[in-house]
Amino acid sequence: MGQVRPVGQAAPVGQVTTAVDPAGTAAPQRARSRHLAEVLVPCAYLATALILTWRIVADPAVRTPTNGSMVESDVELNIWFMRYAATAVAHGHLPALITTAVNYPHGINVMWNTSLLLPGVVLAPVTLLGGPTVSLAILQVVGFAGSATTLYLVLRRWGASIAAAIVGGAVYGFSPAIMVAAEDHYHLQFAVLPPLIADASLRLATGRGRLVRTGIWLGLLVAAQAFIAEELLVDTALVCLLLLAVLVLSRPAQLPARLPAAAAGFGVAVVVTLVICGHALLVQFQGPLTESGSPWHVGRYGVQPADLVTAPDAVVLHGSYGRFLARTHQWPVETFAYLGWPILVAVTAAVVTCWRDLRIRIAGLAFLAFEWLGVGNHRVMIDGLRYPVTLMPWHWLTRVHLLHQVLPNRFPILADGLAGVVLACAFDRVRAAIPAGARWRTPLTAAAAAAVLVPVIPRPVPAGPVPRAPDGWSAALSRLRRDRAHQHGRARSRRIWITALMPWNGRL
């Protein structure tokens, strides 16, 4: 498990270490505690996820997330894609990457849409038995619990104590950004893999991971994320670049010695990714219906500075958020930036006071940079002062071809994970600075953690009934079934069409 070190001492980023006391007699007991935590902590996250989604999981066949008042169209699209993938699997095929089963007769390129291909295939048996909304409910629960668990595991690898890692994982997995994403964006709410991708990248960069095995692991993670949400993969790549940049600037003398092995490891990851995703990427960028430009007004998708401290309805302690959105001309499901003053102050203070802790330094600076990038490509006004768009780094990065469609207002989803890392590591350092015999040590640290986290306590995801089928849908299906009965030779093909076109039917 790596080197044994005193509690509170910083672990090198990417190194597998544990926070243990040097006393050998306590080692077996602490080992049992660690093993027990590996079981209980994910279970606790799962229980929290079920509480936050109880309105949906109580009857997932007929309930789906809303933005507090209505079901967004993206939810209906995800329902269709889950049915589409299950239909393909039921007929012994993987989902086609080009299909005319929607947007007929032109069709769509599935890779250019939020198609959730991997979850759709994995959950196909559930979709076929219970319907697509049941699969999406499971995906949402796993998204909450899984995101928290993966960051918890990464923090434990980086030397955080169990209690601190629990806090850090919760800050990420149940952050305001992910709670907002749960109302409409399944592909963003399922943020399970980014912490693992960042950890594997840092292990390769620091030489603490086995070159081939870690490279293969990173390639598998990247390929899986590509078939879950390419947008989140691009955001994760940007975070990794920021982390690696701060790491290199912090340890420039070590770069020449580590660069060859790191490059070889990343090369292995690229090869694995291309073997798995190569065909899909060719279809996406060279196949039919390839997109160019963006269907969205990308300049509108940026963080307003006030978003960072204005609590959305997704948290318990929120205010008149509807009036704030009306005043700032934002959409309720596109405001991911809130963290509140306590966390913002705590993260900034931790970076300044714990600068020598490499974990806090790279995560904290990456957090600040990523939040700045999230402002996007628009003018910003603070206290009556207007700041030119040229001061926004995203204004210049949008000139990069692969980034011109990226929506920067989603960056806070991963920035919250970086904040969780900083808070967890700072929690350990504060606790280590207090004398071990002090009776007020635990109450004080618990009270401080509560004061920082209370503003981001989430509330359950709002839910509403599954959208009803459009007018005339049942009549059209009945006519197709009659035609199928009269034209037996075309029955198989038409059955595929009927099933794929009918996401509302859970048991066709």
Image (spheres, rainbow, N blue to C red):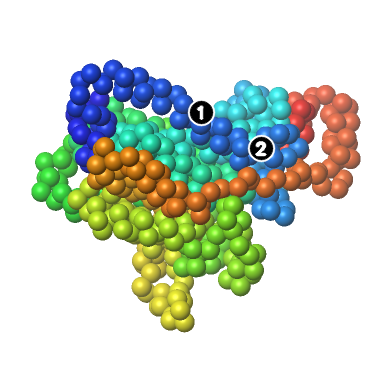
Query: What percent of the width, then of the height, locates residue 230?
Result: 47, 45
**421 or 343: which is nearer to us?**
343
Q: Quadrant of residue 477?
A: top right
Query: What percent of the width, then of the height, locates residue 194?
Result: 41, 41
In the image, residue 267 sits, relative to residue 387, either above or below, namely above
Query: What percent of the width, then of the height, locates residue 21?
Result: 23, 29
Name the residue tied to disc 1. 43
In the image, residue 330 sits, relative to residue 355, either above or below, namely below
Q: Amino acid at mark 2?
A: Trp
Q: Which mark is residue 99?
A: none
> Measuring 24% from the left and 42% from the top, which residue is drawn there?
435
In the image, residue 432 sits, relative to residue 402, either above or below, namely above
> Measuring 37% from the left and 46% from the top, which residue is drawn there?
444
Which badge, 2 or 1, is on the more N-terminal residue? Answer: 1
283 sits to left or right of 20: right
Residue 327 seen by the camera: yes
Q: Amino acid at mark 1?
A: Cys
In the image, residue 377 sits, relative to residue 145, either above or below, namely below
Q: Secondary structure at mark 2?
A: helix
> Measuring 89% from the left and 31% from the top, which residue is drawn there?
482
Q: Could you classify mark 2 by the number of other residues whose Cα lies within 10 Å: few (under 14), some (14-19), or many (20 or more)?
A: some
Q: Could you classify mark 1 by the number of other residues whose Cα lies within 10 Å: few (under 14), some (14-19), or many (20 or more)?
A: some
Query: What percent of the width, then of the height, locates residue 374?
Result: 43, 61
Pointer 2 with pointer 1, Cβ within 8 A: no
Name the residue tied to disc 2. 54
**161 or 193: which is nearer to us?**
161
464 sits to left or right of 383: right
Q: Secondary structure at mark 1?
A: helix
Q: Quadrant of residue 59?
A: top right
**217 or 162: which is nearer to us?**
162
